[in-house]
Amino acid sequence: MNENKTLVIIGAGPAGMMAAGAAAENGAHVTLIEKNTRVGRKLAITGKGRCNITNYCDNETFIAHLTSNPRFMYSAINRFSCYDTVAFFESRGLKTKVERGNRVFPASDKATDVVDTLYHYITERNVTVLQKEVKGLLIEDDAVKGIRFSDGVMYADAVIIACGGMSYRATGSTVDGYTFAKAAGHSITPLLPSLVPLNASDQDIAELQGLSLKNIRLTVIDQANEKEAYSEMGEMLFTHFGISGPLVLSASAQLRDISPGRYSAVIDMKPALDEEKLDKRILRDLSEFVNKDIINSLGKLLPKKLIPVIIHRAGIDPHTKCNALTARQRRSLAEQIKRFTVHVHSFRPINEAIVTHGGVDVKDVDPRTMQSKLVKGLYFAGEVLDLDAYTGGFNLQIAFSTGRLAGESAAKQ
């Protein structure tokens, strides 16, 4: 360790704060630069204010849930695993709990407690937090020498860029990190929204606004090759613009070059029933309401808001009496229940995305240290890199693991 080494970190999000604490633990004098008035603004609103800290899984399971450059993460996750993240917060007094899908949350259900724990971690290690906006890097002879402000400079032996991505613009996310990296000679892969709701072209979807579906199967078909791009069980939500919810966010991470007509989202409302069992179920329900209109007879089978849309799509007059429904009409009804199709035409704007797909090309970064291969003393951590994953705490774990490795490496090298 070099106890005289000075280190500057740009961005006080989860990656930046973890890097700052790790570097300070390893003897560096650390200054953490944040242009917002508070640290961890985006972190404080993640998980609807609850903060899904990580996923309680082994390293191979973690790697399997990455959707961009998984091999790059081997060194970082082996150095600081999901289990290490839980132990880190628990050892600092933040009690955690594990929920469905091995998602780890603070026991208090307060994301602000996660932010506070990280803030106390860095302040206890004498990290200087400076509210200021960085304008650029100081680079000489292919080595970083510090950073530049609008009114001066700050020299440093090493700099870590942890500015985050383009998602959640309201929390201060900008293209700053990409701008700094590009100016240093790094390539930036195309920036796209990931873990984001999807716009749909179907006119009747707006009628379902606010309807949440549980225990359904969502399958996304790529019409370009007629193959499944995604298929999972879980929950989703209809909105005024299309579809959202956990399943849809995860599906979006698998969609590339999205365009009108390319992708169809197919919803199986009753995945536990095959078509024969579903037909028997429909017959049983209809037998209870033989003289009633079909529109008033499916309440035990489907959510109320969904019934008129399903009946219309099945081509059935809503005032058809239950005892007059034909076998062909029942098959059409079952077809809509098992294969309710939503025609996806675009992502929602990137500022509505949970994470950014794309970023600093990892080919230009050493995965063993997070140091640039182009500029000595320059490091990267978190969402600014071309790394992203499914929902479930995996994206925050990327931030913690890369931040930890970058901080330790920058302090020691």
Image (cartoon, rainbow, N blue to C red):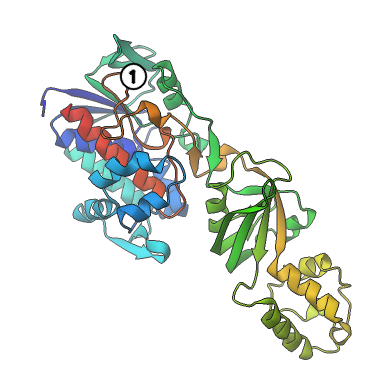
Q: Quadrant of the C terminus?
A: top left
Residue that mark 1 sits on: 374
* Residue 335 on image: x %, y %: 75, 70
Residue 248's place in the image compared with 189, above or below, is below
Residue at image location 78% in from the left, 73% down from the top: 333
Q: Quadrant of the N terminus?
A: top left
Residue 324's place in the image compared with 16, above or below, is below
The amino acid on which the numbered mark 1 sits, given as a three-letter code, is: Leu
* Residue 72 on image: x %, y %: 36, 38
Residue at image location 36% in from the left, 23% down from the top: 132
Q: Nearer the viewer, residue 130 or 6?
A: 6
Q: Which quadrant holds residue 367?
A: top left
Residue pushed farthest front?
A: 225
Residue pushed farthest top?
A: 141
Residue 54 visible in the current orientation: no
Residue 217's place in the image compared with 330, above or below, is above
* Residue 64 on image: x %, y %: 40, 52
